Image (cartoon, grey):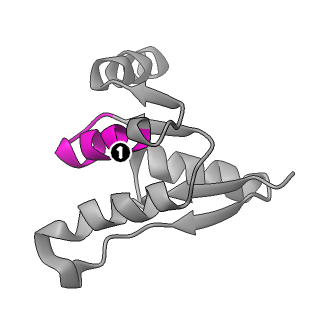
Amino acid sequence: PNMVLGTTGMRKGVDAMAGAWAQQNGVNTILFVPDQRHGNRAPFLRNESIVKLNPVEAIIGEGSGIQSNLAQRLRQAGVPLHIRRISDQAQVRSRNLG
């Protein structure tokens, strides 16, 4: 009942699905959007803010080195992770379309 969803705030993909689920289920959401004033460091500083939230569990959709950095930081903090590999995402997408 006290769950809060922390997301990177992307408008599509896993973040969009999680945000829609949270809204449908009355779950509060915190968006961690990179502050572009920090230039190329912005997504990594955003990842740092996510880890400082002390999440109890995380789901990460494989993508770029930014997601890998987030996964590494969360592992170091002892947060249980569920990583959705790109190949797994493609299999689910083709099952749903076909």
Image spot of residue 1 (x, y percent): 87, 51
- Residue pictured at 46% horizontal, 59% vertical: 50
Image spot of residue 64 (x, y percent): 19, 42
Image spot of residue 91 (x, y percent): 37, 15
Chief secondary structure of the magenta portion: helix
| Count of marks placed on residues | 1
- Residue pictured at 46% horizontal, 55% vertical: 51
Q: Which residue is mark 1?
A: 73
Q: Nearer the viewer, residue 74 or 61?
A: 74
Q: Looking at the picture, which amino acid does disc 1 mark?
A: Arg
In the visual, does 13 lie left or right of 58?
Answer: left
Q: Is residue 80 depicted above or below 51 in this figure?
A: above
Q: Residue 71 lies in magenta, yes or no?
A: yes
Q: Residue 23 lies in magenta, yes or no?
A: no
- The extreme bottom residue here reads 37
Q: Is residue 66 depicted above or below 63 in this figure?
A: below
Binning the other alpha carbons within 10 Å of mark 1 as few (below 14), some (14 to 19) or many (20 upward) gives some
- Residue pictured at 29% horizontal, 26% vertical: 86
Q: Is residue 57 depicted above or below 85 in this figure?
A: below
Occupied quadrant, residue 61: top left
Image spot of residue 54 (x, y percent): 57, 54
Magenta stretch, residue numbers: 62-74
In the visual, does 68 lie left or right of 17?
Answer: left
Occupied quadrant, residue 39: bottom left
Disc 1, SS: helix
